[in-house]
Image: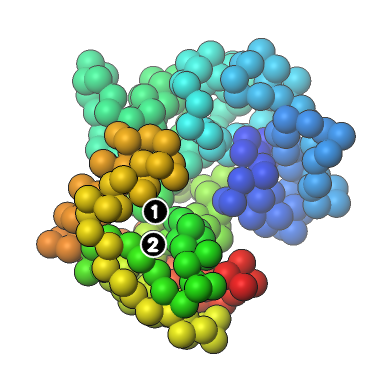
């Protein structure tokens, strides 16, 4: 059985990839920054490495591994993909809902740059292009505890995806035939407005959560102060505004790969109730 290296093993998706692979009896290696503090399931080998220092991956890649790759938002290191291609035959990359680019087109975001590096590497590959994670609404947790969510664009309709569905699709791509060259856009099963998401959180946590519309100008100032990245805030505001006119798309990728429906946002809230309390 091929050893599977999970890069991003402590992430919200990666930890489920590790657990699922281990439960199925696969030979799993988890890349961590500090082996002495790593917590991994029984039978999983923790190895130390850091994407910011590509040569540190050499040991982790020994042995003809398949690779699950999550890139944490640090500057792209082409050497990482070169090393994966040197040692491995297959990579499953957790990407985003991005457009394909020609080889000579400049990337807009780092996911496109990494996808292009992988496509031209000679590796067998699968891209799991995830829509925004349902886990992003944990940013509302403090407001939920106060009984009101103040946010812009309450009518923006989203298709947020459960992190366990992303992990399950990645595991299937790593362990089953028929996924080479696939670009799966993974979404939740339904389109729900921001205000509806807040209402569902209130219902499942047993608290009366009220929606309060926040003016975009106010949101721009508050989110820039909180997140420290004005360009990112601006891109989010533009996206949310667009979703009031054209809802974030819903795909059947989870059903296509796993032969079951995607988990609902309500089921995600039930899995994370304690995080809102």
Q: Residue furthest left?
A: 245
Q: Quadrant of the N terminus?
A: top right
Front-most of residues 29 and 138:
138
Residue 76 percent across, percent down from the top left: 46, 21
Q: Position of residue 39 (x, y in %)?
A: 81, 46
Task: Kindly indicate whether the residue at mark 2 contacts the one at mark 1 (C-beta within 8 angstroms).
Answer: yes
For the C terminus, give its image quadrant.
bottom right
Residue highlighted by disc 1: 132
Label 2 sits on a secondary structure element that is loop
Which residue is depicted at the point 36% across and 24% down?
Answer: 113
Mark 2 crowd level (few <14, some 14–19, many ≥20, 10 Å Cα): many
Quarter of the figure with residue 156: bottom left
Give the mark nearest the N terminus, 1 or 2: 1
Binning the other alpha carbons within 10 Å of mark 1 as few (below 14), some (14 to 19) or many (20 upward) gives many
Give the side of residue 43 with respect to residue 274, left or right.
right
According to the picture, the residue beneath numbered tag 2 turns out to be 160
Q: Residue at x 79, y 47 (%)?
A: 40
Residue at 80% from the left image edge and 52% from the top image edge: 41
Q: Does the image show residue 258?
A: no
């Amino acid at each position: 059985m091929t050893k599977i290296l999970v890069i991003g093993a402590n992430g919200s998706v990666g930890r489920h990839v590790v657990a699922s692979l281990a439960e199925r009896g696969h030979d799993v290696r988890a890349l961590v920054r500090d082996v002495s503090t790593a917590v991994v399931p029984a039978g999983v080998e923790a190895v130390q490495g850091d994407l910011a220092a590509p040569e540190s991956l050499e040991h982790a890649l020994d042995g003809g591994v398949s690779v699950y790759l999550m890139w944490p938002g640090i500057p792209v290191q082409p050497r990482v993909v070169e090393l994966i291609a040197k040692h491995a035959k297959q990579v499953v990359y957790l990407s985003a809902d991005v457009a394909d680019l020609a080889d000579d087109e400049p990337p807009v975001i780092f996911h496109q740059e990494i996808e292009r590096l992988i496509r031209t590497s000679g590796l067998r590959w699968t891209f799991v292009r995830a829509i925004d994670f349902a886990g992003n609404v944990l940013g509302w947790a403090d407001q939920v505890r106060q009984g009101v969510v103040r946010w812009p664009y309450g009518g923006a309709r989203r298709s947020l995806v459960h992190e366990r569905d992303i992990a399950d699709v990645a595991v299937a791509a790593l362990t089953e035939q028929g996924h080479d060259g696939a670009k799966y856009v993974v979404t939740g099963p339904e389109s729900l407005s921001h205000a509806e998401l807040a209402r569902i959180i209130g219902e499942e946590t047993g608290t009366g959560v009220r929606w309060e519309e926040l003016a975009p100008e106010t949101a721009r100032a508050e989110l820039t102060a909180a997140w420290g990245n004005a360009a990112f805030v601006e891109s989010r505001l533009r996206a949310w505004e667009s979703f009031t006119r054209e809802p974030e798309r819903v795909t059947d990728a989870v059903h296509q790969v796993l032969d079951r429906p995607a988990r609902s946002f309500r089921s995600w809230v039930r899995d994370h109730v304690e995080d809102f309390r």
